[in-house]
Image: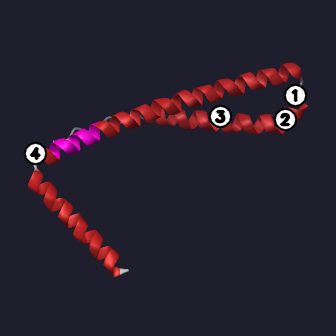
């Protein structure tokens, strides 16, 4: 039987939060960029770069998680097909017939 893969909702929530922060910081920087003095502009730039780096790190981590989960799912599918070749052929044929009927209907 295929084992359930644990999800990491905290990672997804952190990524969404980081991206929202990046967008908010970019919008405020664009709105107020002309009014900032030298030191304020540098501080805003540093904050924006830190937020962007954090979002980038979260995105890379999320990508690695998706790739790993995809590999596990592909391996489980491969094992199932090897263990049940005739069921797999039957399922593939049934799906093909259904798709063929849907295409022919249009």
Point out the residue furthest to the top here: 39
Residue at image position (43%, 36%) is 9
Question: Where residue 98 sits in the image (x, y, percent)?
Answer: 25, 70
Nearest the eye: 24 or 46: 46
Q: Looking at the image, is 58 positioned above or below residue 78?
A: above
Residue indicated by mark 1? 36
Contact (CB < 8 A) between labels 2 and 3?
no
Marks 4, 3: nearer the viewer? 4
Contact (CB < 8 A) between labels 1 and 3?
no
Tell me the crowding category of disc 2: few under 14, some 14 to 19, or many 20 or more residues within 10 angstroms, Cα based.
few
Q: Which mark is residue 32?
A: 2
Tell me the crowding category of disc 3: few under 14, some 14 to 19, or many 20 or more residues within 10 angstroms, Cα based.
some
Residue at image position (65%, 34%) is 21
Q: Is residue 76 magenta?
A: yes
Residue indicated by mark 3? 21
Tell me the CA gap for discs 4 and 3: 48 Å
Residue indicated by mark 4? 83
Nearest the eye: 5 or 106: 106
Q: Is residue 78 left or right of residue 103?
A: left
Residue 80 lies in quadrant: top left
Tell me the CA gap for discs 4 and 2: 63 Å
Q: Earlier in the sequence, mark 4 or mark 2?
A: 2
- Magenta span: predominant SS is helix
Contact (CB < 8 A) between labels 4 and 2?
no
Q: Is residue 62 left or right of residue 95?
A: right
Tell me the CA gap for discs 2 and 1: 7 Å
Q: Earlier in the sequence, mark 4 or mark 1?
A: 1
Tell me the crowding category of disc 1: few under 14, some 14 to 19, or many 20 or more residues within 10 angstroms, Cα based.
few
Q: Earlier in the sequence, mark 1 or mark 3?
A: 3
Tell me the CA gap for discs 1 and 3: 20 Å
Highlighted range, magenta? 72-80
């Amino acid at each position: 039987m295929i084992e359930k893969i644990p999800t990491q909702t905290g990672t997804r929530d952190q990524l969404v939060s980081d991206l929202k922060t990046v967008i908010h910081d970019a919008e405020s920087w664009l709105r107020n960029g002309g009014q900032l003095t030298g030191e304020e502009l540098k501080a805003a730039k540093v904050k924006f770069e830190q937020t962007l780096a954090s979002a980038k790190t979260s995105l890379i981590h999320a990508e690695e998680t998706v790739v790993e989960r995809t590999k596990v799912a592909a391996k489980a599918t491969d094992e199932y097909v090897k263990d049940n070749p005739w069921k797999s052929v039957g399922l593939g044929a049934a799906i093909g017939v259904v798709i063929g009927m849907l295409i022919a209907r249009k």
